């Protein structure tokens, strides 16, 4: 396992994006935050091994070349049931609007 970053070291843009998106869930409460972590495949053992939640999240998405897999983050979000349902709803609304425009021509 890689050692976690010193607290004084500034986050990269990718790290800030990843952690910021998790912060949005953390602000919704411990239950929601715990569920999103588990949904993404980050469990208690990962947190213990990494030393803290922030390090566990970053380690989960870190590639072998030390970059971050932001596509995997997006994939996890789009599979989160509340987000997946909203995306589906927006796509349905868009199709209905397109159909209405075609009909009104």
Image (cartoon, grey):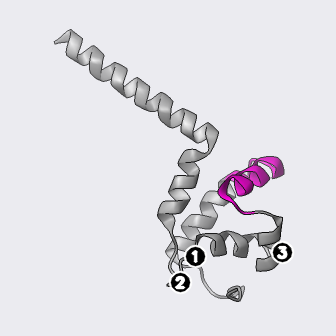
| x and y, in percent, of residue 47 in the image | 79, 71
Residue pictured at 52% horizontal, 61% vertical: 72
Query: In the image, is residue 52 above or below residue 44?
Result: below
User: Which one is nearer the viewer's eye here, 21 or 46?
Assistant: 46
Q: Dot 1: few (<14), some (14–19), or many (≥20) neighbours within 10 Å?
A: some
Q: Residue under circle 2?
A: 66
Residue 29 place in picture, x, y as percent: 80, 49
The quarter in which the C terminus is drawn is top left
| Residue annotated with mark 3 | 48
Spatial CA span between label 3 and label 2: 21 Å
Check whether the beta carbons of the residues at disc 2 and disc 1 lie within 8 A of each other. Answer: yes
Residue at left 83%, top 65%?
Answer: 44
User: What is the number of the mark on residue 62?
Assistant: 1
x then y, percent, for residue 55 = 71, 76
Instruction: State which region is magenta.
Output: 25-42
The tag on residue 9 is none
Q: CA distance from mark 3 to mark 1?
A: 17 Å
Q: Which quadrant holds the N terminus?
A: bottom right
SS at mark 1 in the image: loop
**Up-down: is 103 above or below 62?**
above
Q: Is residue 14 magenta?
A: no
What secondary structure is the magenta-colored segment mainly? helix
Q: Is label 2 in a helix, a strand or a loop? A: loop
Is any part of residue 51 visible from this angle? Answer: no
């Amino acid at each position: 396992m890689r050692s976690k970053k010193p607290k004084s070291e500034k986050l990269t843009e990718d790290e800030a994006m990843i952690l910021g998106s998790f912060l949005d869930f953390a602000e919704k409460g411990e239950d929601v935050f715990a569920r999103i972590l588990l949904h993404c495949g980050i469990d208690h053992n990962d947190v213990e091994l990494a030393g803290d939640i922030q390090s566990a999240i970053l380690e989960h998405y870190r590639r072998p070349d030390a970059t971050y897999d932001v596509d995997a983050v997006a994939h996890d979000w789009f599979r989160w049931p509340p987000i997946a349902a909203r995306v589906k709803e927006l796509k349905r609304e868009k199709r209905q609007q397109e159909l209405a425009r075609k009909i009104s021509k």
